[in-house]
Amino acid sequence: MKMFRNKFIKITSCTFVLGLTLAAFSSCSPEYIMDIVKAGPLAVTVSDTAVTLSQKNYANAAVKLNWTTGTNNGTGASISYILQVDKKGNEMATPVSYDMGKGVYSKSFIVKELNDSLLKRWGGEVGKATQLEARVVSTVYSNPVSGETSPVIGFSVKPYQQVSSSLYMVGSATPVGWNIGNAVELTPSVTEPWVFTYKGLMSAGSYKFAVNREGCWCQDFYTADAVDATKMVHNIGGSGADIQWQITKGGPYQITANLLDLTITVAEFSQPLFSKLWIVGDASPSGWNIDSPKEFTRSSSNPFIFTYEANFVPGDFKIFAGNLGDWCGNWYRPLVNHPDLTLTDVAQNSGCDMDNKWQITSSNAGRYKITLDTYGNKIKINPVMLYIIGDASPNGWNINSPTPMTYADGVYTFTGPLTAGEFKFSKYKGDWCDDDWIIATSANQSVSNASFTIRHGCEGDDNKWKVQAGEAGNYVITINLNTQLMTIIKQ
C-alpha cells in the first residue's frame, strides 16, 4: 500500500474485500473517525548564531527564535509551547522560561531586553560573547496530556555597557558652580536617550559632566579629551585626567553630549530656536488643531520669552514649535506626563514617542497666563486673577492685598461698595509694575463708561475710573477678558 506522511487521513470502519487487482469497500460506517497528524519532531532554529548588541539599536530585535509545530501524535489535540533560554553549561537547570501559549511559533528578543538578561542573570561580560542555549517544550492537551522537548540550539551574544540614563553638569561656568548636590540636569533625547542637551546661561569658567548628584567625587565623570575638545573621555569612578571644558565668554549656550559617540557640541546662540510658538490641546482654544492653532506672543524686549493667555477647560495641552501640521515635529512638553502646574521645568524635543502633556482638570479650569522662557527652558503656568484697587475700592491702594474678583465661566465679577474716589484693576498683587493692568481709556473716566484697555507694567497712561460723591454705593462690575467687555452696574 502507498504510505502517507504529513497528511490528514480519515479512516472509516468498513468491511474490506481484497482481490488481486481490486480493493472493495463494503458495510462502511462513519462512527469511528480519527485525525492523524504527522508534523515531525519539535525543533528550534535561530536567526543568527553570533549576535553583537549595540545600544544604538536598543529598541530593535536582536535575534529571533523559530520552532516547528511538533506533533499531537494523531490525537487532534491542541499544543502550547514554552521557550526556555539558559547559559551554556547550566544544562537548562534554571532557564528563563517564556510561556508562548498556543499557535505561536517564534519569539524575537529586543536588544535592551537581551542585554539586561546577559549582564544581570547570566553573568555576561561587556564586549565578550556569552554562549546561550534555547529549547522549546510542548504540551499536547490530549488524554492523557503528553508533550515533547526539542533539542537545544546554541548561539552567542556579545553585550554592551549601557551608558548612564541621566547626566548632570557642574563647574564654575554653570549656574550652580561646583555644587554637585544641585548639579544642572541635562535633558535626554526622546529618540536617542544617550544624547543629552542643556540650553541656558553659562558664565566664563569651566565645567564637566557627572552621572548623578551624589556628593562623592568618585562617581563616573565625562571630561574633555586632551587633544580634541569636541571629544569626551569617560572617567569611570573619577579616574583619569580631570580636563574640563572652558567657556571664555558668558552668555546663552546649547550644549549637546553624546555618551555613545563620546562627542560634545557647544554652540552660543543669540536668538531662540523658534520665532513662533502655538498652544495645542483640547484644554485650550486651539483644540487638537496643528494646522492653525492659537499663537503665543513673543516679547519685544526679550526674544526668548513667549506668553499666552486664555480660558482653559478640562483636558490636555502642550506647546507646538517648528513647522505647522507635523504631529511628530518640535514641541515644548513637560518632563513627565500631567505634572503639577506649579512645576517649571520643560523639555524641547521632537517626535511622537514620549508625548508628555500638561493637564487641566475640572477643579482647576479657568483662565491662565503661560510664560515660556526658551532661553532656560522654564515655564510658568499661572491662574489669572483680577483685583480691584483704588481709594474707591474696599482695600484702597493696597497693592499687596487688593480686593479680589470672583471667576466663573470666563467672567470676573466684583460685587460690593464703591466710595467716592478712583479705581482700576490689576492681574496681580505685590508691586506696581509687575504685570498687567486693566485701565480706563481716558483719565477720570465716568462709571457709566465701561470701555477699557490693557497696560503692561508701568508703561503708558495710568487712566482710572472716577466715582463721584453722588455715585457712591453698591456695584456689580463684570469683566470678560475673552470678549473684552466690561459692565459697571449700580445696585
Image: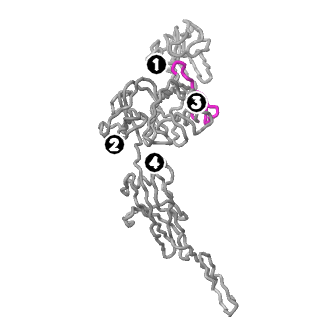
Q: Nearer the viewer, residue 155 or 468?
A: 155
Single out the mark in the foreground, 4 or 1. 4
Residues at circles 4 and 1 in contact by the CB criterion of under 8 Å: no
Which label sits in the foreground, 3 or 4? 4
Q: Is mark 3 on a helix, strand or loop?
A: strand
Question: Sequence order check: which comes first, mark 2 or mark 4?
Answer: 4
State whether residue 27 is above or below residue 247. Answer: below
| Quarter of image, res 114 | bottom left
Binning the other alpha carbons within 10 Å of mark 2 as few (below 14), some (14 to 19) or many (20 upward) gives few
Residue 93 lies, with reference to residue 235, above or below; the image says below
Residues packed near mark 4 inside 10 Å, few (<14), some (14 to 19) or many (20 plus)? some
**Residue position marked by numbered label 2 in the rendering:** 236
User: Can you tell which quarter of the image residue 29 is in?
Assistant: bottom right
Do tag 1 and tag 2 residues touch (Cβ < 8 Å)?
no
The amino acid type of the residue labelled 3 equals Trp
The magenta stretch spans which residues? 282-302
The residue that mark 4 highlights is 55
Decide which of 399, 52 is in the foreground and name it. Answer: 52
Which residue is labeled 3 in the image? Answer: 278
Residue at 37%, 58% in the rendered image: 122
The residue that appears at 42% across and 55% down in the rendered structure is 158
Of labels 2 and 3, earlier in sequence is 2
Q: Element under label 4?
A: helix
Kind of element beneath mark 2: helix
* Along the viewing direction, whichever of 126 and 134 lies nearer the viewer: 126
- Tell me the distance, in whole angstroms, between the alpha carbons under discs 4 and 1: 52 Å
- Give the amino acid at mark 2: Ile
Q: As shown in the figure, which amino acid type bears the numbered disc 4?
A: Gln
- Of tags 1 and 2, which is closer to the observer? 2
Tell me which label, 4 or 1, sits earlier in the chain. Answer: 4
Q: How crowded is mark 3: few (under 14 residues within 10 Å), some or many (20 or more)?
A: many
Asked whether disc 3 touches disc 4, contact meaning CB atoms under 8 Å apart, the reply is: no
